[in-house]
Image (cartoon, grey):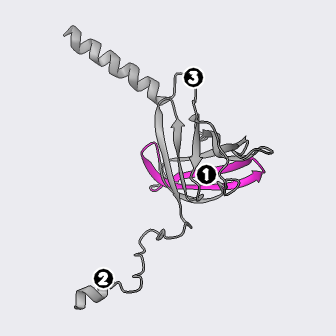
Amino acid sequence: MARLVAALLLALAGGCERSGSSGEAVDITAPRPEVYPEGASDFTGEWVGESAGIFGTLSIQRLASDRYYGRFTSEDGLTRFVINLRQDRATPVAGGAMEPGNLVRFTWQDGRGGRGEGWVLINRENSALSGEIRYGGLGAWDFVRTDAPGLAAPGEAPAAGPGERGDEERATS
């Protein structure tokens, strides 16, 4: 019986920490930013993917040279929050003046008392984001740009390339 009570107390303590109600600041350890040889990274645009296991759309707009505003909305519309992003600057490997890098750190809030922070890296092609979001616990952030070359819109089948037969053609063969 004592083991059951101890297990329940541990589960409750873990649940409280994940809910973000502890009020403690969470230390975010982000990787070091870098400047790709292709130039400054651009985080603006529409992205689809997941925030801590919740699938949805992330919209990011530029506010200033190193500042962005974002909105995340889950597919079912039940999870929504706004994001304040700040792009880190770094010195290119070849040297020279600091430029906007491939890393942004952010804070978020949902307007209902939920808030947290995180970081995200963008790939060289400016087509994918990967990072962490803190909401009392830790969750992954993984998104792809909806207007990236070769990415079909949801519900849209990719077109058959030269020499490839589409599904309609296979069905009649």
Q: Amino acid at mark 3?
A: Gly
On the rendered structure, is 91 left or right of 60? right
Disc with the residue nearer the chain's start (1 vs 3): 3
Residues at marks 1 and 2, CA–CA distance in whole angstroms: 37 Å
Main secondary-structure element of the magenta-colored stretch: strand
Q: Which mark is residue 23?
A: 3
Residue sitting at 58 percent across and 46 percent down?
121
Marks 1 and 3 in Cβ contact (< 8 Å): no
**Tag 3's secondary structure?**
loop
Residue sitting at 59 percent across and 23 percent down?
25
On the rendered structure, is 42 left or right of 148? right
Residue linked to disc 1: 71
Residue placed farthest to the front in the image? 94
Marks 1 and 2 in Cβ contact (< 8 Å): no
Q: Is residue 62 visible?
A: yes
Q: Which residues are magenta?
A: 51-75
* Image position, residue 64 (x, y; %): 79, 50
Q: In the rendered view, would you say 47 is above or below 7?
A: below
Residue linked to disc 2: 167
Q: Amino acid at mark 2?
A: Asp
Q: Is residue 113 visible?
A: no
Quadrant assignment, res 29:
top right
Q: In the rendered view, would you say 65 is above or below 167?
A: above
